[in-house]
Image (cartoon, rainbow, N blue to C red):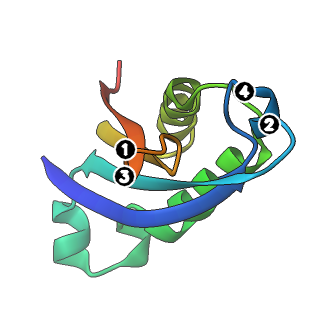
Amino acid sequence: MDIIFISGLTAATTIGVYDHERDITQDLIIDLELGCDARKAGVSDSFEDVLDYDAISRRTQAFVEQTGYYLIESVAEQLSQILFDEFPIMQLKIKITKPGAVDIADAVGIMIERKRN
């Protein structure tokens, strides 16, 4: 399995369970590891054979910025479904970091792994 990765993608959204969080936007930092077979692209050197990480990055950012979920767990799960539906990904890991969510930690977050059904 080959891995295309996208690291440090930032998206501002309304996220959180507390009343004060529902009136503001907060940055989430998203890291993706996308499992694919990159051999064809490696041999052909053709854009048509590659996993389009620019399109994936833009789709991820657009999705996260338009959501209004309470939980980052929901963001991660719904994002995984969108990426599987729209791109030829065989498996993925998503890490979503919410900086400053807990005052005694730099950040909190979630990491999920999913495989195409």
Q: Mark 3 or mark 2: name the one nearer the start of the chain.
A: 2
Vertical order, 78 against 11 (above or below): above
Dot 3: within a 10 Å radius of its alpha carbon, few (fewer than 14), some, or many (20 or more) residues?
A: many
Read off the residue under disc 3.
32
- For residue 20, the mark is 2
Q: How many marks?
A: 4
The answer to whether the residues at label 2 and label 4 have Cβ atoms under 8 Å apart is yes
Q: In whole angstroms, how far apart are the C-alphas of marks 2 and 4?
A: 6 Å
7 relative position to 19: left or right: left
Q: Residue at x 55, y 36 (%)?
A: 79
Read off the residue under disc 1.
95
The mark closer to the camera, 1 or 4, is 4
> Residue flagged by tag 1: what amino acid is it?
Lys
- The residue closer to the viewer here, 113 or 48, is 113
The mark closer to the camera, 3 or 4, is 4
Q: In whole angstroms, how far apart are the C-alphas of marks 1 and 4?
A: 22 Å
Vertical order, 97 against 47 (above or below): above
Vertical order, 82 against 104 (above or below): above
Q: Mark 3 or mark 4: name the one nearer the start of the chain.
A: 4
The answer to whether the residues at label 3 and label 2 have Cβ atoms under 8 Å apart is no
> Residue flagged by tag 2: what amino acid is it?
His
> Residue flagged by tag 3: what amino acid is it?
Leu
Vertical order, 66 against 20 (above or below): below
Q: Residue furthest right?
A: 23
